[in-house]
Image: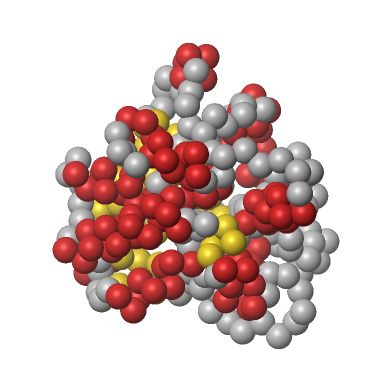
Amino acid sequence: MTLFFTLCSKNYIAQAITLQQSLKEIHPNIDFVIGIVDQLNNVEKNKLKNYSFLEVDDLEINVFNNMKLKYNVIELNTAVKPYYIHYFFRKGFQKIIYFDPDIFVYISLNSIIQQLDEYSFILTPHFSTPIYDNFLLSEQIVLGTGIFNLGFLAIKNDTTGNALIMWWQKKLLDECILDLSRGYFVDQKWMNLSICHFDNYLINKNKGLNVAHWNLHERNVSFKDGQYWINDTVPLIFFHFSSYSPDQPNKIANWQNRFTFETRPDIAPLFQQYGEKVLTNNYIFWKQCKPVYGKKLHKNKSMKHRIQYKLIHWIQSI
């Protein structure tokens, strides 16, 4: 059995619903779960009555109480990822595919599902072509935050997959930290070591996977034969709208200055269509919902906290 899932606090549920709709349109019979790293009230639960969701408390993670006091909202959402995967493994799912909630799927994912017949886990690099300009995001930033983008992960319930998840759980228990000065970048940077510690993996460089603002320098979008294409050669499989907000429809992403919609009109229809879909999924309501779990940050408390506050927003671009 194959399961697709995402994780988010309740202020990102509109994006998670949009992801589910894109998946269900292509794979109507798949199992998909929205993992809610938060606590929902009755009104919020009622709005999700037509969707399959799993609140983090229902996993009965015995270390979660400490994690939610120690980690901020971004750290917490990323720290529980291997715990959710482990839970789904115990429920009998053999193939697990994780997507960040701000991803939209355009065509069948059967190629990824089939690759898990051979490989224990699949990762995608942020990009696979050198960058020679001085714009953001840069190669230096990716060296500090992780060469693989963990907005996507496919993993199999086998010996290697379970060993990876158990190792990852141990690391994220106390070290899912957003602190670039100490070499930490939540769950993502740890995965640099996965290809050293474990075998039977695939680094999938298909340019139709995980298309996002950080790899637009190597990927152009076109529309022909009823679907989107990358570089006119491979179909667009899924696009990662990281840091995009329908509130700022003319902005590709925060902390990105390489492109604009004026210089990249090829991507403008994707963003317009995506923004409209998110808005129709109660974006205004969900955006205003304040996460219950996660250590609170005070923007003006100290220089250290101000820097961390900015990093919280910056991480959403990667």
Residue 111, located in which quarter of the rendered image?
bottom left
Residue at the image position 59 percent from the left and 61 percent from the top = 179
Left or right? Give the position of 256 relative to 92: right
The total number of labels drawn is 0
Left or right? Give the position of 256 relative to 103: right
Q: Nearer the viewer, residue 157 or 212?
A: 157
Residue 311, located in which quarter of the rendered image?
bottom right
Question: For the view shown, which residue lies furthest in the front direction?
Answer: 302
Left or right? Give the position of 34 relative to 162: right
Quadrant the C terminus occupies: bottom right
Left or right? Give the position of 120 relative to 52: left
Residue 160, located in which quarter of the rendered image?
bottom left
Residue 278 in the image, given as x and y percentages of width and height: 62, 36
Residue 84 in the image, given as x and y percentages of width and height: 33, 44
Residue at the image position 19 percent from the left and 44 percent from the top = 90
Residue 224 in the image, given as x and y percentages of width and height: 58, 61
Residue at the image position 33 percent from the left and 47 percent from the top = 83
Task: Using the rendered image of the protein, determine whether residue 23 is visible from the camera's viewpoint.
Answer: no
Task: Using the rendered image of the protein, determine whether residue 43 is visible from the camera's viewpoint.
Answer: yes
Residue 89 in the image, given as x and y percentages of width and height: 22, 48
Q: Is residue 129 above or below residue 314?
A: below
Residue at the image position 64 percent from the left and 78 percent from the top = 140
Rendered image coloring scheme: secondary structure
Q: Is residue 176 above or below residue 4?
A: below
